[in-house]
Image: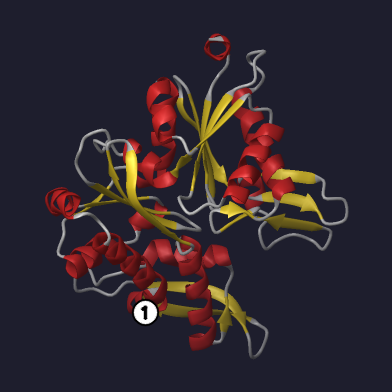
Amino acid sequence: MFQNILGWFSNDLAVDLGTANTLVFVKDKGIVCNEPSVVAVYRDTGKVIAVGAEAQRMLGRTPANIVAIRPLKDGVIADFDQTSEMLKYFIRKVHNRKSFISPRVVIGVPSGITQVEQRAVKDAAQASGAREIYLIEEPMAAALGVGLPIGEPTGNMIVDIGGGTTDVAVISLHGVVYSKAVRVGGDKMDEAIVNYIKNKTKILIGDRTAENIKREIGSAFKVGTGDKTMEIKGRDLVSGIPKTVMIYEDEIREAIREPVMVILNVIKVALENTPPELASDIVDRGIVLAGGGALLRGLDLLLKHETGLPVIVADNPLCAVVNGVGKVLDDLDILRRVAMR
C-alpha cells in the first residue's frame, strides 16, 4: 500500500533501453524522449561531455582526447558506468525533479538476457535514482504496444528487430510460450554494408553512412522493377584520398543477405517449436513485425514468400516496445503478470 501511495506523487517512467536508441515514456504524457544511445566522454578522466543526440553528432568526428561510445552492444550493457550515466541523464531530463519521490521505472530488455545482465540493468537504473525497477521482455512489450490480444488463449507471434538483437516470441495468456533471441539486428546489417563496400569498391565508409544507405536504398526482397541508386562518399583505401562512388539497391540487398537470413531462420525455428493449436492461430493471424528493422523495405514480402504466412508490419514499429512498456504503468496487475521474475 505504501508503494501505491508513493506512486500517486511520482512520474513513473517506462524505458526502451535499445542498442541504437533509448525511448522514454512518462505516465499520462506518452513518449517524451527519443534519443540515440550514445555517450561522449573525455578519454583520460571518463567525465561525460554529452549524451544522446548531441553525443551522436560527435561519432567519428572527435579529437584524440574525446571518445563517443555506444554503451550497449547486442542489446545488453557493454559499459556499466556509461550506461548508468546515460540512464541518469534521460531520467533526470524527463523527470526533472518535479516530484519529491523517485520514479518507478519499467525497462524493456531482450528475451535472451542472462541473470547477470538483468542485474546490470537493474543496478544501472537504481544508480539513476529509480524507486522500483521492473524488467519486461521486449517481445512481450512489443506485443502489448501493437495491440495484440496477449491475454487471450490464442497464439500471437511477434518479431522485434532492434539495433542489436532480434527477438521472436509466441505469446498466449500473458505468457511467452516460446521465445528465441539472436544478437543480429540493424547494427549487423550496417556492418555488413561497410564490409561489402570496402571489399567491392575499396572505399571505407563509417557506420552512420552505412545506416543512411540501408534506409535509403536497402531492401530484403526485390520490390518493383526499378533499381534505386545512391551516391556515397568515403576514403579510398588505395590512394587515401576521399572519393565518391555510385552504389545500387541490388548490391545492398546482397550485402545484407546474411543477417537477413539469420532472422528468417530464427522465425522458422520458432514456428517449428510452436505447439500445433497455437500454430493454427498464427496461420490465421500472421506474424507481426516490430522494431526499427521492420522498416527494411521488402522484409515482410520475403518472410511471406518463405513461410507462406501473412506478415503484418506494425503501424509504428520503432515505438512498439516503449508503448507496450508504457501501457503497463497504468495497470499494475498486468505489470506483475508480464514482468520478469
Q: Position of residue 86 (x, y in %)?
A: 67, 41
* Figure quadrant of residue 333: top left
* Figure quadrant of residue 215: bottom left
**Looking at the image, is 280 positioned above or below residue 148?**
below
**Looking at the image, is 251 positioned above or below residue 274?**
below
Could one spot residue 219 in this view of the protein? no
**Looking at the image, is 340 positioned above or below residue 221?**
above
Badge 1 element:
helix
Between 79 and 177, the one nearer to me in the picture: 177
At horizontal 20% and vertical 38% (from top left) the residue drawn is 153
Between 275 and 82, the one nearer to me in the picture: 275
Q: Position of residue 158 (x, y in %)?
A: 30, 49
* Figure quadrant of residue 208: bottom right
**Looking at the image, is 132 positioned above or below residue 71?**
above
At horizontal 30% and vertical 39% (from top left) the residue drawn is 146
At horizontal 65% and vertical 22% (from top left) the residue drawn is 96
- Model colouring: secondary structure
Q: Which residue is mark 1?
A: 254
Q: Position of residue 243 (x, y in %)?
A: 58, 80
Residue at the extreme right: 44
Dot 1 crowding, Cα within 10 Å, few <14, some 14–19, many 20+:
some
Q: Is residue 64 left or right of residue 4?
A: right
Q: Is residue 187 left or right of residue 298?
A: right
Between 90 and 141, the one nearer to me in the picture: 141
Between 226 and 95, the one nearer to me in the picture: 95
Q: Which amino acid type is marked by label 1?
A: Glu
At horizontal 33% and vertical 78% (from top left) the residue drawn is 250
Q: How many marks?
A: 1
Q: Position of residue 287 (x, y in %)?
A: 23, 53
